[in-house]
Image: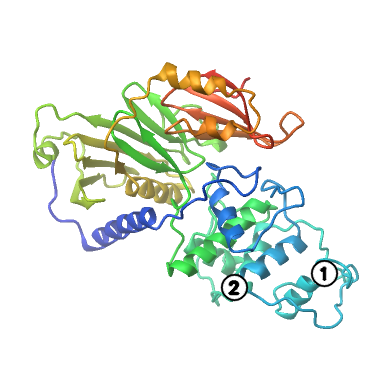
Amino acid sequence: MIFQTQMNRKRLVLFFCAFFTAMLVFSNAATAAAAASFPDVPENTVNFGAIEYLKSKNVISGYADNTFMPDKTINRAEALKIVLLASGKSVTTSGDLPFSDVKKNDWFYPFVSKGYELKIVKGYEDGSFKPGSNINLAESLKMILLSFEETIPATVDTAPYPDVEKDSWYAPYATLCKTKQLSWPLSDGKLHAEREITRGEFAQIIYRLMYVREKKLEKFPMSTDWQSFTHSTDHFEIKMPFDWQVIRAGEQTVFWKQDTGNEQFSFGRSYPNSATVVIAINKNETAVSFDDFLNGLKYFTEGVTQKMTLNNYPFAVISFTGQNRFDYYFELPNKTFLVLYADAGGGDNNQYLMEEIRNMIGSIRYTESASGTDRDALLAQVREKVLVKNDGQSALGLFTEIILIETDTIGIGTGPIDYYYSSEYEVTLKYERDSNTLLQIRDGRTTAF
């Protein structure tokens, strides 16, 4: 392999910016509350951090039954109330409103009045406000950014997303959303601004904007509320997005973003909107130095190597011209080498997948010792908690790493059902949120209970 000792200036600047951002992400990560404020928003779910943050700021309070219903679509009246409270606007009535469907005795009247006064919202041509109509993503971005008095781009020269024309009415709001990373596109790389969004998604956008302003950041650090994966024997911890899968492949661990839009069924081949990060440990049994290890690598194509210190560990990255492929190497404190092979497809989602990969790499931490927990003993403890009401979270807490792989929002008539998978113990747990009950446990990764 040919090692180039100098990178061009532009590439070097971009590289350092990406990784220093990733390090900032990890160190500034928000601390989750010890217990969920809402039974239907458990820990280790995508909106937990956002909803706990807004609850702590007295922006949201949930429904009378103490649920938040994060998967329920949000209407115009609910959205306006949340955003005005979040942005600190004093809510007072200011005369009559020109809306035929907003009366002074309506709970949302003060919020609609204030929103109309501030020109955050307006009505429809038929004279209605439609407070009960669901709000889409484009409308949400406009409402939120105007409420927080963000500086909206006067003109948009380039389409911010493949499905957002630069001259569309919401292009300025979509551009600012992208710049600050307030919302992530769907898995095809498109914003789909016309889609109705949920209460959880709406809370997520507000939370990210408040977090950016509070921390004085240019954009929201993507890994702030990601789930953590800890390998019990290879001495590493990594943060990962909620929609990535973890697969054990012999002595290696595969993190996979599946391209469902193109019907990808295996991580073995790269698809346009897929990505993989494969992690392996080189035990360094011959006790070579990190430099000698790097110098001994053999490649069939020319790569560009950059060495530095990342997270206080000796670190190197090898990039390949014209490819969405990067190899990363850490020397861990125990003198083993952590090796990460990252690959992303070249579709519309590429830039977002690469951002996620950079944040994953930036989150790597060494763990001092393996758990040493006997598998059979731990699973026996878990099985003792099956069908024990109000003890489900303690059962999930017995695992050092566990990820949510699917949610059945309808459940079995009593509320949402979550399926958690532990790749370390190779079991799936079926959990009922409302009663905080572990319903069942099965070997392997499955939702077929």
Which type of secondary structure does the marked residue at label 1 adopt? loop
Residue 325 in picture, x, y percent from top left: 32, 42
Tell me the crowding category of disc 2: few under 14, some 14 to 19, or many 20 or more residues within 10 angstroms, Cα based. Answer: some
Residue bearing the label numbered 1? 124
Residue 338 in the image: above or below residue 113: above
Nearest the eye: 182 or 321: 182
Residue at 60% across / 54% down in the picture?
A: 51
Which amino acid does the dot numbered 2 rest on?
Answer: Phe
Residue 238 image point, x, y percent: 37, 41
Determine whether the residue tagged by mark 2 lies in a helix, strand or loop. loop
Q: Tag 1: residue type?
A: Tyr
- Disc number for residue 432: none
Name the residue that disc number 2 marks. Answer: 148
Residue 59: x and y in percent read 64, 63
C-alpha separation, residue under disc 2 versus residue under disc 1: 23 Å
Residue at image location 47% in from the left, 45% down from the top? 347
Tell whether 220 sits left or right of 322. right
Q: How many marks?
A: 2
Front position in the image: 219 or 401:
401
Q: Is residue 166 above or below residue 374?
A: below
- Disc number lying in front (2 or 1): 2
Judged left or right of residue 98, residue 136 is left
Query: Is residue 78 visible to us here?
Result: yes
Residue beneath the point at 36% across and 49% down: 358
Residue at screen point 32% across, 27% down: 252
